[in-house]
Image: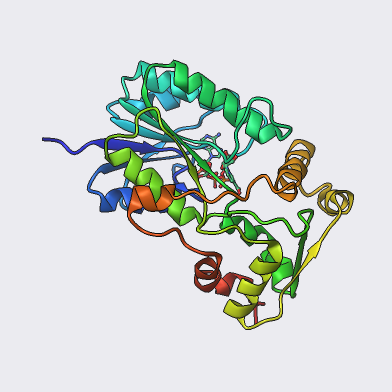
Amino acid sequence: MNTPTVLVTGATGTIGSALVPALRARGVTVRAMTRDPDRPVPGAETVVADLREPESVAAALKGVDAAFLNSPSAPDAAELQIRFADLARDAGVHRLVLLSQYAAHADSPVRFLRWHAEVEAHVQELGLDHTVLRPNLYLQALLAFAGTIAQGWFAAPIGDAAVSAIDTRDIAGAAAAVLTSTGHTGHTYTLTGPRAVTHAQIAQALSAATGQDIAFHDAPADQFTAALTGVLPPWQLEGLVEDYAHYARGEAAEVHTSVTDLTGHPARDVTDFARDYAAAFIPAE
Ligand SMILES: NC(=O)c1ccc[n+]([C@@H]2O[C@H](COP(=O)([O-])OP(=O)(O)OC[C@H]3O[C@@H](n4cnc5c(N)ncnc54)[C@H](OP(=O)(O)O)[C@@H]3O)[C@@H](O)[C@H]2O)c1
């Protein structure tokens, strides 16, 4: 019998790059999607396709048994994901695993959560075997702050709110489990770390792992916006501020057991993340 083929979108990205080896370890054939013809993905059959080019996506989906759908954050992300899901159904893909976000909801004040809810609602109507993964804030998102963290500080408009942030390696582990085992049809799994942590606690974990003094400063939203104006496009910056307001209201602090339930391993703690990524937060010599 042929081994099943799983298509991984965003295969060179944060989740995808951890998902490809996790799937390989489970013995399936991995087809890794990238837009870059010069970027073969190790351990996978690489397919060149762009979510904005439907013909390339349809070709990438040929002969695929299951697909993992993740797209970069973009103003048209919902449209691109909905079109991918339709093409997956047309191609006869048996199972679709959708990467969404913690607290996705059509009425959310956070635009990203509304976009994810729109895709979830569409996928639920398609009649495909589907599963939704809703991860909370990525611990790896801290890598975007590495420049100032290496100088001893980082700032965000979150106050002392706790968030059950998750290591993206655990999201990949959970996705690999759902893509390769049965019993997940129609389920929505909220994926979190093992505890909710404040940004001050994150700073403590980074300090302990790096041996440097790292402080967290709460930043008013307008100051945070001013610092990133011109760095991020307006839609993304406004969305990020909405995300932080949602965290600051304490709306992202629930701890769920889905990572352990799906993978058989406890979710990584912020101290594990800090230990494994310490080098990224240490000033260059
Ligand atoms: N950051 C968080 O804390 C957080 C929390 C929960 C959920 N999320 C969700 O995670 C998703 C974004 O994840 P991320 O920022 O970590 O991104 P990412 O997965 O690292 O995305 C980048 C990937 O997207 C691929 N890509 C870019 N444009 C593409 C296109 N037009 N067609 C096909 N592939 C394309 C890139 O591949 P190539 O360049 O190789 O083509 C790359 O592999 C969003 O849906 C976001 O809402 C994020």
Number of dots carrying numbers: 0
In the rendered image, the vertical position of residue 36 relative to residue 69, given as above or below: below
Which residue is nearer to you in this view: 225 or 165? 165
Q: Is residue 54 visible?
A: no
In the rendered image, the vertical position of residue 109 relative to residue 282, given as above or below: above
Q: Is 69 on the left-hand or right-hand side of 139?
A: left
Q: Is residue 98 visible?
A: yes
Spot occupied by residue 131 in the image (x, y as percentages of width and height): 41, 32
Spot occupied by residue 154 in the image (x, y as percentages of width and height): 75, 65
Q: Is 239 on the left-hand or right-hand side of 5?
A: right
Which residue is nearer to you in this view: 167 or 22? 167
Q: Quadrant of the N terminus?
A: top left
Using the rendered view, name the quadrant where residue 60 is placed. top left
Using the rendered view, name the quadrant where residue 32 is placed. top left
Using the rendered view, name the quadrant where residue 153 is placed. bottom right
Q: How is the image coloured?
A: rainbow
Spot occupied by residue 182 in the image (x, y as percentages of width and height): 27, 35
Q: Residue at x 83, y 53 (%)?
A: 224
Ligand 1 falls in which quarter? top right
Q: Residue furthest left?
A: 1
Q: Residue at x 40, y 59 (%)?
A: 266
Spot occupied by residue 50 in the image (x, y as percentages of width and height): 50, 32
Q: Residue at x 67, y 66 (%)?
A: 146
Q: Is 244 on the left-hand or right-hand side of 103?
A: right
Which residue is nearer to you in this view: 159 or 63? 159
In the rendered image, the vertical position of residue 58 relative to residue 176, given as above or below: above
Q: Is 3 on the left-hand or right-hand side of 218?
A: left
Q: Residue at x 74, y 74 (%)?
A: 151
Q: Quadrant of the C terminus?
A: bottom right
